[in-house]
Amino acid sequence: MDTYIFRKTINRLPGAIVHCIPTPDPRVLEGYACRQQAGTYLQEKAYKRVLLITDQTIHALGYDQLIEQGLQERQIDYVKFDAISSEPDIATVEACRKVALAHKAECVIALGGGSVMDVSKMVAAGAKMPHRSIRSLLLKFLPVWGKTLPIVAIPTTAGTGAEVSVGAILLDDKGVKNSTVLIGLQVVLVILDSELTVHAPLNVTAACGMDALSHAIEGAVSAVRVKEKDAAYAKEGVRLVLQHLPEVMVHPDNADARMGMCRAALYGGHTINKQLAGYVHAFAHSIGAKYHLSHGNAISLVMMPVLEYQKKACEDKYAMLARYCRLTDKENDAEAAEDFLKAVANLLDLCGMNKLKSPVQTSDYASLVKMIAADSINYSSPITLKNSDIIQILKTITVNQTA
Ligand SMILES: [Fe+2]
């Protein structure tokens, strides 16, 4: 059954709901190896008991050492929890919250990628509701009265924007990814330390970079109306990725370009909070879940087909982005929009992300259409796709085109 009419009718509803949710607007600290200053900030704010959350890969790389050193120098009493997998579940958050409560943590430092950020947010919320199970907190919207514990977020990848986005994803009891929006999330400081991303493998850098780009583009073309400041995050996010990702791919140790990507990711996180995402994400979530593809790879696979398909509805916004990023001198919107799409396609090419092997099979169309249509209900996309439109896009990324 095509839920097109229903989806089109409620298209503006998610955007309206999101406007009512307070979102973090933290202080931002930038610099190469600046993560040591986490201790200085905590001392300034008089936080004496801290929980440092990270994962074992980050620990093996030694990225936590500078932070611990900063905490020790300022006599801040901290404990560390690093047992976090790439797909964290309820048990992980329960175990981590236990440590937070036992230590009477006043603040959480989250050092890592999206999974560490997600666990940290749920722990910071769960610590304020110690008598409730984490399972009972896995709601679509979770109000935290009096706000979560304050979080100092130190992202180690430049992509998800999870350092400020109000969502958290956890595996539920059935192993299904469950997304929760935290109302009252308190991120007090984001530390953008380019040293943490300099040694990331190029395929990870590219996949994360494409994710950041998708957040910014989808925000810029979203049907949600936002204030100028929020609109600027989206435009600037697109510009930063187009400027810095090519340089990072050629000179991975260029700390300035890496910092540009860290900023782009942060702006993307702000953008998700205000303008939500769109069909690039609806397709990527469904294809990623069905074929176990990483988020960045799934995004890269569907980016051009979706952007091309919705071109007519977004022509003026694509043209605006082309002009803002100085990609065109065309006055005609259709031509300027083409220049924008070419720039995105060129970037995918340069990063090698246009050569990803598609796993999509015609035999899976029915289930994929259902998943994509259901997912798109959560967004305020510039257009609403009918099931037949979704199939048209799927056809462009299908391995066996016989059906
Ligand atoms: Fe994303």
Image (cartoon, helix red, strand yellow):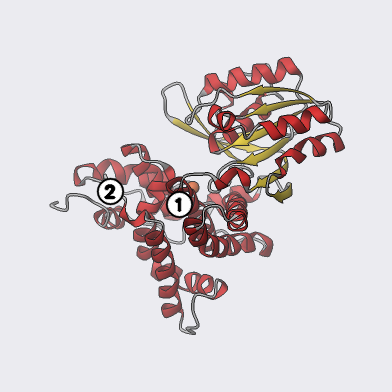
Q: Position of residue 35 (x, y in %)?
A: 71, 41
Residue most extreme to the bottom: 331
**Structural distance between the alpha carbons of marks 2 and 1:** 17 Å
Q: Does 91 appear above or below 268?
A: above
Q: Can see residue 245?
A: yes
Q: Amino acid at mark 2?
A: Ser
- Residue at the spot 62% in from the left edge and 59% down from the top edge: 233
Q: Amino acid at mark 1?
A: Ala
From the viewer's perspective, tell me whether residue 132 is left or right of residue 386: right
Q: Quadrant of residue 162?
A: top right
- Structural crowding at the residue carrying mark 2, measured as other residues with C-alpha within 10 Å and reported as few (<14), some (14–19) or many (≥20): some
Q: Position of residue 373 (x, y in %)?
A: 37, 47
User: CB under 8 Å between callouts 2 and 1?
Assistant: no
Which residue is denoted by mark 2 in the rendering? 358
In terms of depth relative to the viewer, which is nearer, 100 or 111? 111
- Residue at the spot 42% in from the left edge and 78% down from the top edge: 334
Which residue is denoted by mark 1 in the rendering? 206
Count of labels in the image: 2
In terms of depth relative to the viewer, which is nearer, 221 or 8? 221
Q: Position of residue 100 (x, y in %)?
A: 70, 21
Which quadrant of the rendered structure holds the N terminus? top left
- Residue at the spot 46% in from the left edge and 54% down from the top edge: 210
